Image: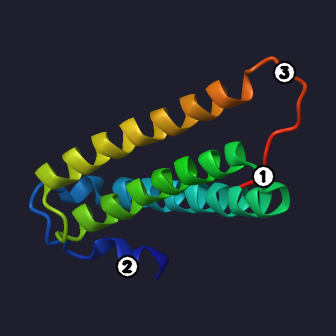
Amino acid sequence: MALDILAVDFPADWVTPEFVPLLVAGLLLAGLGTLSLFVLSVVAYTRRLQRRYLLICLALGALATRTVVGWGTVFGVVPMTVHHVIAHLLDFLIALLVLYAVYRSGSGSSAPEETV
């Protein structure tokens, strides 16, 4: 049966058993979405080789890393406190990278952007 994988006892004691399927589904969707966006951003960066594309690529890589940390927390590898610290640091990094990419691209100049 397809849902037997969701019946696994997770080592993390904070997971309520009836919410495990929702948690796993959410992490699967987040993982597929962020990984897809990250791969697309890597492709875009390799085609353009511009710094703003690199910054967005790094931001999406950090977003994908948040999902990995989430899986580590569900399986008891990453403690919940460490999970929260890492997640908030990654949130800050993502915001910083995106804002810097916007700042660098909004110069108002029509000069071509340098490649990395």
Q: Are marks 2 and 1 in contact (CB under 8 Å)?
A: no
Q: Residue at x 17, y 69 (%)?
A: 76
Q: Residue at x 46, y 53 (%)?
A: 62
Residue type at mark 1?
A: Thr
Rate crowding at label 2 as few (under 14), some (14 to 19) or many (20 or more) other CA atoms within 10 Å.
Answer: few
Q: CA distance from mark 3 to mark 1?
A: 16 Å
Give 85 or 10, whichever is nearer the viewer.
85
Label 3: which residue?
109
Q: Which mark is residue 62?
A: none
Residue most toward the top? 108
Residue most toward the left? 13
Residue type at mark 2?
A: Asp
Q: Quadrant of residue 91?
A: top left
Label 1: which residue?
115
Residue type at mark 3?
A: Ser
Q: Position of residue 15 (x, y in %)?
A: 18, 56
